[in-house]
């Protein structure tokens, strides 16, 4: 039986409630999620042009979309007494080349572009984030030691979060799902030890647990919140099954902080032998009323 080898696809989906800007015309093609993402990532130098032998940039554009505002709301979550989160927007790109040993996975740049696009569309109350991390695109050809340089930019960037309002610190539950590949389950204890070696205050991890489960995110004991629609199996080793769940506190509930954490977890998983895509789902435990930024 042959094993599928997914390409370097990065996917992001935002879940919550989106209030569109009243002045925006959704029928104008240049203002849809796809066109806005292309324009923004091109302006930032992150987009690789869609032509043969193109160079530069970090990713090529695949697709993007904005989900319609639901007419009716799903049943409330017992944990929050609020509607279960709906997907409001999604974005998919393909990495242009393997990520060099001295650089982390460009998740922060990806989510920064996503954040800018969504801000052009409307105001979002972000309740969950789902990310596909192409860990197999990290260059670890010389072993775990070759990735040491990639951690340094992440540690240097912690200063960006240093002066944040301590009231924004948020309890989160972050799930890494390896789909049909179980390697993340065996890697999880080592990942936790490794993350605790660094003096950083962006994410404080209290504990990690492993499980085999369906494609849902538990936000409290006895309460399951299913994020729909799920990501198609063809872009990773889906369907969902083998999981490691990290419990801790994030400096702030923002796409910026989630992007930092995603890149940090990707480095940790690569160091401990994960060589396949991981589906990351981040969910907050408290909703103090902040938005994506």
Image (cartoon, grey):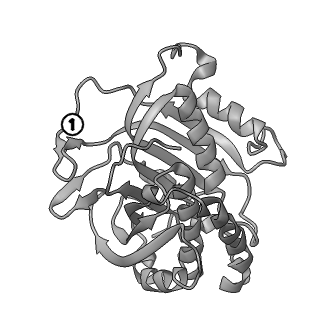
Can residue 87 be seen by looking at this rendering?
yes
Q: Nearer the viewer, residue 47 or 261?
A: 261
Residue drawn at 71 percent across, 73 percent down: 152
**Quarter of the figure that contains the N terminus:** bottom left
**In the rendered image, which quarter is residue 197 located in?**
bottom right
Can residue 177 be seen by looking at this rendering?
no
> Residue 123's x, y, as percent?
46, 31
Q: Nearer the viewer, residue 34 or 291?
A: 291
Q: Nearer the viewer, residue 142 or 262?
A: 262
Q: Residues within 10 Å of mark 1 (few under 14, many from 20)?
A: few
Residue drawn at 68 percent across, 77 percent down: 140
**In the rendered image, which quarter is residue 175 located in?**
bottom left
Residue drawn at 21 percent across, 36 percent down: 74
Q: Nearer the viewer, residue 90 or 126?
A: 126
> Residue 223's x, y, as percent?
18, 57
Q: Which residue is mark 1?
A: 74
Residue drawn at 59 percent across, 34 percent down: 117
213 vs 35, left or right, is: left
């Amino acid at each position: 039986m042959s094993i599928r080898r997914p390409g370097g696809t990065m996917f992001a989906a935002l879940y919550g409630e989106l209030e569109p800007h009243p002045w925006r015309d959704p029928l104008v093609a240049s203002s849809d999620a796809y066109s806005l993402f292309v324009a923004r990532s091109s302006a930032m130098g992150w987009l690789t042009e869609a032509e043969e032998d193109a160079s530069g940039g970090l990713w090529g554009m695949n697709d993007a979309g904005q989900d319609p505002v639901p007419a009716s709301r799903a049943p409330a979550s017992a944990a929050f007494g609020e509607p279960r989160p709906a997907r409001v927007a999604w974005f998919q790109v393909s990495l242009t080349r393997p990520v060099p040993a001295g650089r982390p996975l460009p998740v922060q740049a990806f989510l920064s572009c996503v954040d800018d696009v969504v801000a052009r569309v409307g105001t979002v109350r972000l309740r969950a984030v789902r990310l596909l991390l192409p860990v197999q695109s990290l260059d670890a050809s010389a072993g775990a030691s070759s990735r040491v340089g990639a951690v340094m930019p992440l540690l240097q960037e912690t200063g960006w979060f240093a002066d944040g309002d301590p009231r924004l610190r948020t309890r989160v539950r972050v799930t890494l799902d390896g789909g049909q590949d179980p390697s993340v389950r065996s890697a999880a204890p080592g990942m936790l030890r490794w993350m605790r070696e660094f003096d950083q205050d962006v994410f404080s991890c209290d504990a990690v647990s492993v499980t085999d489960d369906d494609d849902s995110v538990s936000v409290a004991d006895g309460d399951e919140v299913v994020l729909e629609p799920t990501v198609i199996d063809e872009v990773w080793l889906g369907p969902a099954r083998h999981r490691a769940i990290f419990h801790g506190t994030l400096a702030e509930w923002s796409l910026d902080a989630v992007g930092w954490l995603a890149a940090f977890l990707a480095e940790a998983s690569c160091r401990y032998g994960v060589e396949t895509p991981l589906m990351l789902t981040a969910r907050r435990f408290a909703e103090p009323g902040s938005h994506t930024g």
